[in-house]
Amino acid sequence: MFSIIASVGKNNEIGKKGELVFHLKEDMEFFRKTTKNHTVVMGLNTWLSLPGKLKNRKNIVICEKDVPKADQTVKDLPSFIKNNQNTPEEIFVIGGGVIYKEFLPYAETIYLTEIDASDEKADTFFPIFDKAKYKTTLIKKGSEDGLNYSIVKYNKI
């Protein structure tokens, strides 16, 4: 089963120049706790933006060439989706924008940290999805560094 996890601004912005748009400690902690001991799937740009391999997770990178230090490189995305969409394991899709868009139709759950702010210089965006097709659960509301946020779980109905 695929789940998506992301942090988004008011305009669905997620990235800028290969970095996250917003950096919230609470969001990072939620990400770590939620994805720990799971498989995480990402595109090459997301992999390159990380300080290194994510500990306590199986790191899979979607790329046409082998990616050193990744646990697995996936070159055939449609086959990977077909072979893993019905697995009982929760596989987390962690970015970037193109990868989110590819997996969105197959994701049963979406975890979004929705930040009440925007960045006009953002260059990567989370795909728009029909929230009416999901049951919404508020996990947490908070404020950090002057930014209000909500961590929301969307389960496909």
Image: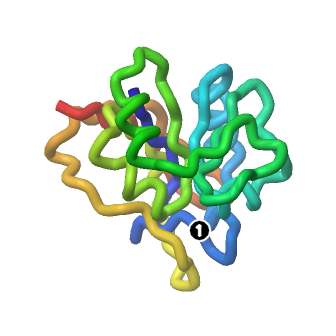
Q: What element carries label 1?
A: strand
Q: Whole-percent x and y of residue 125?
A: 46, 68
Exactly how many numbered labels are in the figure?
1
Would residue 154 appear left or right of 44 to someone viewing this image?
left
- Residue pushed farthest bottom? 121
Q: Whole-percent x and y of residue 75?
A: 56, 51
Residue at screen point 32% across, 37% down: 154
In-front residue for pair 34/72: 72
Residue at screen point 31% across, 32% down: 108
> In the rendered view of the protein, which quadrant contains the N terminus?
top left
Q: Mark 1 points at which residue?
A: 15
Residue at screen point 61% across, 59% down: 64
Residue at screen point 65% across, 45% down: 73
In-front residue for pair 91/116: 91
Position of residue 119 relative to residue 65, above or below, is: below
Residue type at tag 1 = Gly
